[in-house]
Amino acid sequence: MLRLALSTIVVDDYDAAIAWFVGMLGFVLSEDTPLPPDKRWVVVTPPGGGAGLLLARAATPAQAAAVGYQSGGRVSFFLHTDAFDRDHRVMTARGVVFVDGPRAEVYGQVAVFVDICGNRWDLVEAA
């Protein structure tokens, strides 16, 4: 059986990214392992399970240029919920910046937010 386990987000700073994903989205810090000489293996996961995010600190100028622009300005990630209004309200109260929506689409209710790096996400409750 195949399953998607991790997706990488290139970040400026490990600790700031951990604080944002845990504090703003309620993700769980699943792993934070030092890798010599100055890297870390940092994984955060949604509280309901599913694929995790590997938070990788930019180590080259090309990687630094990709921070916040990993998919060319398109929505990169899709966070599904079974209670859109509740989660939208909680995330807004925590300071998550929504840049579009909420709106009804054929596939469900959606609002677009940006993460600490500027990557675009959809918060989606399927129809």
Image: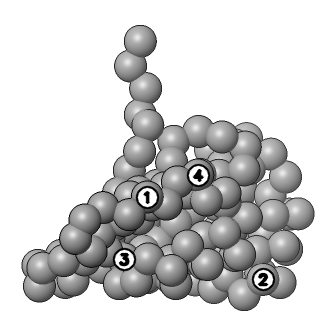
The residue under label 2 is 94
First in sequence: mark 3 or mark 1? 3
Q: Closer to the camera, 18 or 4?
A: 18
Disc 2 versus disc 4: distance between alpha carbons? Answer: 21 Å
Q: Closer to the camera, 107 or 71?
A: 71
SS of the residue at dot 2? helix
Residue 38 sits in which quadrant?
A: bottom left
SS of the residue at dot 4? strand
User: Mark 2 near mark 1, Cβ–Cβ under 8 Å?
Assistant: no
Residue type beneath disc 4: Ser
First in sequence: mark 2 or mark 4? 4
First in sequence: mark 3 or mark 2? 3
The residue under label 3 is 11
The residue under label 4 is 30
Q: Is residue 76 left or right of residue 36?
A: right
The residue under label 1 is 33
Residue type beneath disc 1: Thr
Judge whether 41 appears above or below 111 on screen. Answer: above
User: Mark 3 near mark 1, Cβ–Cβ under 8 Å?
Assistant: no
Residue type beneath disc 3: Val
